[in-house]
Image (cartoon, rainbow, N blue to C red):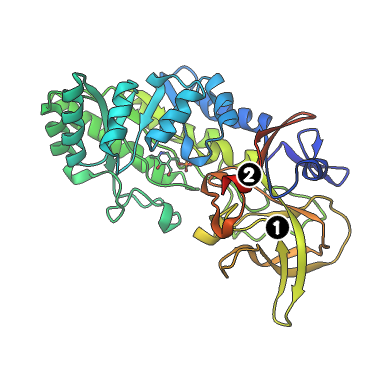
Amino acid sequence: MTHFHYKENILHCEDSPVQEIAEEFGTPLYLYSKQQLLDNFRSIDGAFAGIDHVTCYALKANSNHSLLKLLAEEGAGADAVSSGEIHLALKAGFDPTKITFAGVGKRDDEIEYALKKNIFSFNVESQQELDVLNAIAGRLGTKARIALRINPDIDASTHPYISTGLKTNKFGIDISYAMIAFKYASSLPNLQVDGIHTHIGSQILKLEPFMQTAQTVVNLVKELKSIGIDIHHIDFGGGFGVTYKNAIKHPLLPVEETNGAEEAPANDIFISSVLPILKTAGCKLVIEPGRSIIANTGILVTKVLYMKDNGVKKFVIVDAGMNDLLRPSLYNAYHQIVPLTVQQRESDTVDVVGPVCETGDFFARDRELPTVERGEYLAVLTAGAYGIVNASHYNARLRPAEVLVNGVKVRVIRERETFDDL
Ligand SMILES: Cc1ncc(COP(=O)(O)O)c(C=O)c1O
């Protein structure tokens, strides 16, 4: 998070003190760094130098219009999982010929919408979907360009809810059935078989599962060639993990225990570990990173409302809740939480919880935190991915505002909701 840092013990995003922004725009507040976003995209896209490729940003991670526009201007493509996301991508200026459409449950109207927009590729996830897509394309008098999403049955060693490349997961077509599925797809008149797609999960920290997947895909390309099916592109998906613990280090902040296993390799390392393998297939390469582009560009700023000690536990009750950032409640996900000003002070072991009527409404449990006071702000770090997109009106709470920082400039990129939005 190089663009979130303490300057004279005060947390800044780029050149702007976070506290001043929180006071001006209120909390809970999502706050993003433009430069971090650009750096992240360029570190991934740049790792492909000289190779025919497209980096399709996965909109599901964060689909704020202003952030999408920045990525579209950088030449990114878009990975969508609904017609709504295709619509948002087009509105933000993404080139339709750089849009991929994945998802196990594409509705007929969504397929029709995407066909009319002439997107780059439908990433098809079942044989029945092939039939439906073929029929709809035929009715519209067009051909659908497709990749088959292959489930390679490879363990990505991530949280079970975000593992997608195992036989027991709902995603893709089983690798043992891949040849039959490709032959069948090639026989359908309104489909143009163009690629192989894989995406084995999210928040993957090890390189081995990616390398194993790359080898599986390359082998399949060769096998398909031997029976006369030429594959032109490999869509390798996303899933590159990010570092949530010790995202910001400072001598006055507690060091978070990691058992050495939770630090993510740099973005370009993920790419350079698989490129030598993927290149041997001689295909155009597509990747679909979401989290690794957007997670550490954003933080959630929240205000301490109350402190409570029931003799067994100490609670810090903040004004953001699980409706604003669901990840801790949903996956027990870890986010570093830091005060906006660091100074010599005692620390306490606390639960940081929100106002929502659920015991599962927490941001941290049994967390060592510098002692805080009512009215003080805290930053929940690395909150840019799968944050605002999962926000809801639960408990009739209004969704937070989002602001974008560019040096000393700050602008609202989504207004805070009002009662009229409920
Ligand atoms: C098909 C597909 N592509 C890309 C992504 C983005 O993954 P990540 O945000 O982990 O890079 C996902 C997310 O699960 C996905 O399902």
Q: Is residue 351 above or below residue 330?
A: below
Q: Residues within 10 Å of mark 2 (few under 14, many from 20)?
A: some
> Toward the viewer: 160 or 208?
160
What residue is at 57 percent from the left and 38 percent from the top? 294
**Precedes in sequence: disc 2 or disc 1:** 1
| Ligand 1 image position (quadrant) | top left
State which quadrant residue 187 falls in: top left
What residue is at 54 percent from the left and 57 percent from the top? 394
Name the residue furthest front.
Answer: 420
Can you give x and y, in whole percent of width and height, for residue 387 in the image? 57, 47
Label at residue 417:
2
Q: Residues within 10 Å of mark 1 (few under 14, many from 20)?
A: some
> Toward the viewer: 391 or 268?
391
Can you give x and y, in whole percent of width and height, for residue 331 in the image? 50, 59
37 displayed left or right of 165: right
Q: Amino acid at mark 1?
A: Asp
* Residue tagged 1: 319
State which quadrant residue 255 falls in: bottom right
> Toward the viewer: 141 or 291?
141
Q: Secondary structure at mark 1?
A: loop
